[in-house]
Image (cartoon, rainbow, N blue to C red):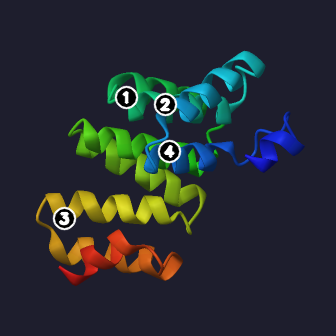
Amino acid sequence: ETMLRVEPLRLEGLELYSSCLWHVDMQAELCYLAQRLLDFDRLHPVTWCVAGNCFSKQKENQIAVKLLNRAVTLDPHMAYAHALCGHEYVLLDEFDKAAESYTKAIAINKNSYNGWFGLGQINERRERYSIAEVHFRKAYEINPLCVPLRCHLAS
């Protein structure tokens, strides 16, 4: 919020902020942010990540995928956009597409915690537990403070 006041034209980092809003159920603020960015710059991939998060929070996962894919089209090297796409595909039970998105995120940024965690979740759902554990451990190396990850490793 401080960044938005101090640097109202800055877009970098707002995709992460929008994910925080998503996780703490601040849907009104997330929708406001998405609309603000859509009014400001429709050619920036962060705008479409934020809009995708907004629709994801409303459980409009098909629309979220389209918006996140627009972000990927605008910046194919944006690992976070690929990882967000993966999350949406998981919610749509499209695990092959999700795995492809997570793999792209990791190819772009080998420290993509979200990519490794996502691959772990897919393999866990597919009952490939040893492969899931490898992916969860890699995610844990990157982000050891994540409580859900610790729960996956414990099980």
Residue at point 27% right, 61% down? 121
Q: Position of residue 96 (x, y in %)?
A: 26, 44
Which element type, helix, strand or loop, lies under badge 4?
A: helix
Q: Amino acid at mark 4?
A: His
Q: Earlier in the sequence, mark 4 or mark 3?
A: 4
Q: Residues within 10 Å of mark 3 (few under 14, many from 20)?
A: some
Structural distance between the alpha carbons of marks 3 and 1: 26 Å
Q: Earlier in the sequence, mark 2 or mark 3?
A: 2
Q: Amino acid at mark 1?
A: Gln
Q: Position of residue 67 (x, y in %)?
A: 50, 25
Q: Amino acid at mark 2?
A: Cys
**Marks 4 and 2: which is nearer the front?**
2
* Left or right of 125 on screen, residue 67: right
Q: Which residue is mark 4?
A: 82
Question: In this view of the protein, which residue sits in the foreground, 67 or 54?
Answer: 54
Structural distance between the alpha carbons of marks 4 and 2: 16 Å
**Marks 3 and 1: which is nearer the front?**
1
Residue 98 appears in the figure? yes
Q: Earlier in the sequence, mark 3 or mark 1?
A: 1
Q: Which residue is mark 1?
A: 58
Q: Which residue is mark 2?
A: 54
* Left or right of 147 on screen, residue 14: right
Quadrant where the C terminus sits is bottom left
